[in-house]
């Protein structure tokens, strides 16, 4: 079936809706994602200042990051259900308010308990926005799922790129508390306003619209309860956990790693731009972590989901090893962290699109939310990485474990997931 069928006459639900409208919905979703990106990707900038002020251990502070990721991810199936039932607007409205409240509370937190509660509130809000925007993209673009999910996820991956330098500077000039307060209020307000214009996607149950023979789509819509009974779902879940764990470790621990490597504040000059190594790495990482999502999403639309997974996960395994081996050099640290994030961020386009391809569009937000909880499961390994590094006296074991998990995920994509999904689709076609 070619794309002209998907864009064709009255039989297509998407064609009945002006093309500009669905692209407008996509753009608003991307902006909303960009506004919540700092809740995760900006966190590493705050870890050391919080520790310096209160004397709390890094491991104790990173529990807040784990709580944030758990609440952001494990509640997404519920938020996805609300989106499937009531549409995206009320869910994103509530999410914007909670995201702002979480960071405002962080600015006043003088106990670990308050820091943890703020993390939970911010996580619920971020999950509401994230799950809604990705689910909405999957529904509005059944003909370009990889690309649409990738562009939406790119807002979350690259959204903090423009604000990493301002937040870092604001922390140094006004303190981390003021950065939490003012950036939190501003980001939440933008999400709240844009939510007013989000609308429900039309029914795309009968559409496939993918021109590539390498991307099969289910003609049946599976409810979340039915999805949980499918072995192919649990293979995807395991792979998601493996790949997400290494990236989350790098996201949360990049600041401490740079400090232990003694390179965080060393100026790095690349193409005439001079920044401290950690700040430079974070800015480049956000851009590459964003670009990889639509790039690999588009690639997967062309060559298939599993081959794309194999390439990306294998690259991540190599990148993590290279970062550990050569990362003590400031320039290498900046470049190799970029490689790691480029090879990691695509999971947020590949897995949602693969899930919708496999289990249908009707419950796409709920089902993608179920799979997204794998990120929360992976986050449980983040505090363990601090403990392992402390116990062994270096980051060696952490990097080796992360690299091996990515290599195993690459093998699973090609030799397990690929034949399982093919059998699943062929069974439905019979």
Image (cartoon, rainbow, N blue to C red):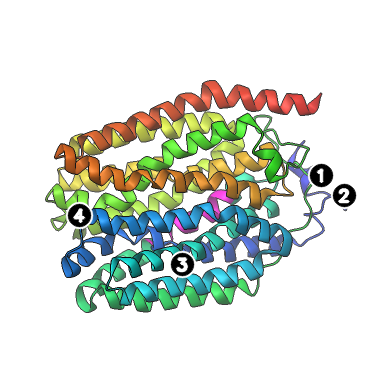
Q: Is residue 127 left or right of residue 357?
A: left
Task: Tell me the CA gap for discs 1 and 2.
Answer: 9 Å
Q: Is residue 27 above or below residue 373?
A: below
Task: Tell me the CA gap for discs 2 and 4.
Answer: 55 Å
- Residue 233 coordinates in the image, percent (x, y): 60, 35
The answer to whether the residues at label 1 and label 2 have Cβ atoms under 8 Å apart is yes
Mark 2 or mark 4, which has the lower sequence index?
2
Q: Which residues are magenta?
A: 149-160
The answer to whether the residues at label 2 and label 4 have Cβ atoms under 8 Å apart is no
Q: Which residue is at a point 87% across and 49% down the rendered structure image?
A: 11
On the rendered image, what quadrant is the C terminus found in?
top right
Q: Is residue 356 at least partly visible in the picture?
A: yes
Q: Which callout, 3 or 4, points to the residue nearer the camera?
A: 3
Neighbor class of circle 4 (other Cα within 10 Å; few <14, some 14-19, many 20+) is many
Q: Secondary structure at mark 4?
A: helix
Task: Tell me the CA gap for discs 4 and 1.
Answer: 51 Å
Q: Which residue is mark 1?
A: 206
Neighbor class of circle 3 (other Cα within 10 Å; few <14, some 14-19, many 20+) is many
Q: Is residue 361 left or right of residue 129?
A: right
Neighbor class of circle 2 (other Cα within 10 Å; few <14, some 14-19, many 20+) is few
Magenta-drawn stretch, dominant element (helix, strand or loop): helix
| Label ID, residue 277 | 4
- Residue 249 coordinates in the image, percent (x, y): 32, 46
Mark 4 or mark 1, which has the lower sequence index?
1
Q: Which residue is mark 2?
A: 11
Q: Secondary structure at mark 1?
A: loop
Mark 1 or mark 2, which has the lower sequence index?
2
């Amino acid at each position: 079936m070619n794309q002209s069928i998907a864009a064709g006459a009255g039989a297509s639900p998407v064609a009945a809706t002006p093309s500009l409208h669905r692209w407008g919905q996509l753009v608003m979703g991307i902006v909303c994602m960009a506004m919540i990106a700092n809740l995760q990707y900006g966190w590493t900038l705050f870890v050391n200042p919080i520790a310096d002020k209160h004397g709390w251990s890094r491991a104790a502070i990173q529990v807040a990051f784990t709580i944030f990721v758990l609440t952001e991810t494990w509640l997404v199936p519920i938020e996805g259900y609300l989106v499937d039932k009531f549409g995206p607007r009320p869910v994103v409205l509530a999410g914007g308010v909670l995201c702002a409240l979480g960071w405002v509370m962080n600015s006043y937190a003088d106990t670990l308990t308050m820091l943890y509660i703020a993390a939970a509130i911010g996580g619920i809000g971020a999950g509401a926005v994230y799950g809604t925007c990705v689910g909405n993209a999957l529904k509005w673009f059944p003909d370009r799922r990889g690309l649409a999910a990738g562009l939406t996820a790119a807002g979350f991956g690259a959204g903090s790129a423009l604000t990493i330098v301002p937040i870092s500077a604001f922390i140094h000039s006004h303190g981390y508390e003021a950065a939490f307060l003012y950036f939190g209020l501003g980001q939440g307000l933008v999400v709240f306003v844009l939510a007013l214009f989000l609308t429900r996607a039309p029914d795309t149950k009968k559409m496939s619209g993918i021109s590539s023979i390498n991307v099969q789509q289910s003609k049946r819509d599976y409810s979340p309860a039915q999805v949980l009974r499918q072995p192919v779902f649990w293979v995807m879940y395991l792979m998601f956990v493996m790949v997400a764990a290494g990236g989350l470790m790098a996201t949360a621990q990049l600041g401490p790693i740079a400090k232990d490597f003694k390179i965080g504040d060393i100026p790095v000059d690349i193409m005439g731009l001079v920044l401290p190594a950690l700040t430079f790495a974070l800015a480049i990482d956000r851009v590459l972590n964003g670009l990889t999502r639509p790039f690999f999403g588009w690639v997967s639309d062309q060559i298939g989901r599993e081959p794309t997974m194999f390439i990306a996960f294998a690259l991540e395994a190599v990148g993590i090893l290279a970062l550990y081996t050569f990362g003590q050099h400031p320039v290498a640290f900046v470049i190799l962290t970029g490689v790691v994030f480029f090879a990691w961020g695509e999971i947020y386009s590949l897995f949602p699109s693969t899930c919708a391809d496999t289990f249908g569009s009707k419950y796409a937000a709920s089902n993608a939310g179920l799979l997204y909880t794998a990120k929360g499961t992976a986050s449980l390994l983040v505090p363990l990485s601090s403990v392992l590094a402390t116990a062994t006296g270096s980051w060696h074991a952490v990097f080796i474990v992360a690299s091996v998990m990515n290599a195993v995920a690459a093998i699973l994509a090609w030799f397990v997931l690929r034949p399982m999904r093919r059998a699943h689709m062929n069974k439905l076609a019979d």
